[in-house]
Image (cartoon, helix red, strand yellow):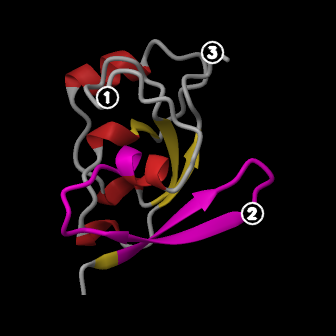
Amino acid sequence: MSDINIHIQNSDSTITSLQAPTDMGLSLMEFLKGNEYDILATCGGLALCATCHVEVVKGYEILSEISNDEYAMLDTLPNITDTSRLSCQLKLSPDMEGLTVKVMGDGLS
């Protein structure tokens, strides 16, 4: 099976669970946008705008290592957390089963 369960923590702390395909090369950002989450993705997934900022609530340790460019972009945000990531930099993979994220946006609005 190539689908995984991704959980999104909503602003009211409820959790929405969605099935995400891992065989299409999608990033978490593309998947969230496709499910109508409010992500601007102004730069189109190049890690240049931070409008796809998510806080990883569960599963941070299973993600790929953060790049210097991604960290530099996150470091410009007022609402960065210890488990912040840019969802455009996270390609969906079977290892991400059960990942829980909270959409943070750029924190500037």
Q: Amino acid at mark 1?
A: Gly
Q: How far is the residue under mark 3 from the one under mark 1?
A: 18 Å
Q: Residue 36 in the image: x percent, y percent?
A: 56, 50
Q: Report which residue position mark 3 lands on.
A: 108
Vertically, is 45 above or below 87?
above
Rendering coords of residue 78 (x, y %):
59, 16
| Residue 8 among those drawn in magenta | yes
Tell me the quarter of the picture where residue 94 sits. bottom left
At mark 2, the secondary structure is loop
The residue lying at 45 percent from left, 53 percent from top is 34
> Label for residue 75?
none
The magenta stretch spans which residues?
A: 4-30
Judge from the rendering whether residue 92 lies leftward or rightward of residue 10; answer left or right: left
Q: Disc 3, disc 2: CB below 8 Å?
A: no
Please tell me how crowded label 2 is: few (under 14), some (14-19), or many (20+) other residues with Cα within 10 Å.
few
Q: Which residue is mark 2?
A: 14
